[in-house]
């Protein structure tokens, strides 16, 4: 189970927004509520991360949410290619830059295809940030 976590000096994570974003769809919102997020969509010049959570063991989890209506072209998980992974790593480096000691981290992907949701833990490595 993931627990609430806030970086030093940060405000509580806002509730999910409504709209067309995959994260606002009911299946993704269910994941959000069950996980107690750190931050939702922290945006930086380096890029944006959909969710930042903390696992029980202290691991900071960066979550990319992808939605596709069909599995055409590989489906939602396959759309997180090398370039997207690099942008997420860069955003994570910026996000973690406020810490005096770098916590362990991992990158997960929440893949939504139609009404099916799959949470892929450790979808790709941190590239040693």
Image (cartoon, helix red, strand yellow):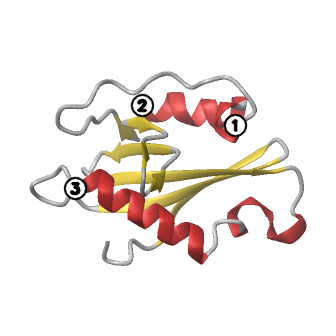
Depth order, front residue of 111/24: 24
Calculate the distance from the C-alpha at mark 3 to the C-alpha at mark 1. Answer: 27 Å
Kindly report which numbered mark, 1 or 2, lies closer to the viewer in this rendering.
1
Q: Quadrant of residue 126?
A: bottom left
How many labels sit on residues? 3
Give the left or right position of residue 90, taking residue 9 as reference: right
> Where is mark 1, residue-wise?
21
Of the image marks 3 and 1, the number of the one nearer the N terminus:
1
Residue in the image at 9% along x and 55% along y:
100
Are the residues tagged 3 and 2 within 8 Å (C-beta)? no
Dividing the image into 4 quarters, which one contains the N terminus? top left
Q: Residues within 10 Å of mark 3 (few under 14, many from 20)?
A: few
Depth order, front residue of 20/3: 20
**Residue furthest left in the image:** 100
Give the left or right position of residue 109, taking residue 43 as reference: right
> Where is mark 2, residue-wise?
36
**Secondary element type, mark 2:** loop
Give the left or right position of residue 49, taking residue 81 as reference: left
Q: Position of residue 75 (x, y in %)?
A: 80, 63
Q: Residues within 10 Å of mark 2 (few under 14, many from 20)?
A: some
Q: Position of residue 98 (x, y in %)?
A: 18, 49
**Secondary element type, mark 3:** loop
**Secondary element type, mark 1:** loop
Residue in the image at 71% along x and 66% along y:
79
Of the image marks 3 and 2, the number of the one nearer the N terminus:
2
> Where is mark 3, residue-wise?
97
Depth order, front residue of 71/14: 14
Q: Position of residue 72 (x, y in %)?
A: 90, 66
């Amino acid at each position: 189970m993931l627990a609430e976590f806030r970086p030093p000096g940060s405000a509580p994570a806002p509730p999910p927004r409504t709209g067309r974003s995959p994260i606002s769809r009911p299946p993704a919102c269910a994941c959000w509520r069950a996980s107690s997020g750190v931050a939702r969509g922290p945006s930086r010049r380096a890029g944006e991360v959909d969710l930042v959570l903390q696992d029980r063991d202290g691991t900071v989890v960066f979550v990319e949410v992808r939605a596709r209506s069909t599995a055409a072209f590989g489906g939602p998980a396959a759309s997180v290619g090398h370039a997207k992974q690099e942008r997420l790593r860069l955003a994570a480096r910026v996000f973690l830059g406020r810490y005096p000691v770098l916590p362990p981290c991992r990158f997960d992907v929440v893949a939504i295809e139609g009404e099916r949701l799959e949470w892929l833990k450790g979808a790709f490595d941190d590239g040693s940030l």
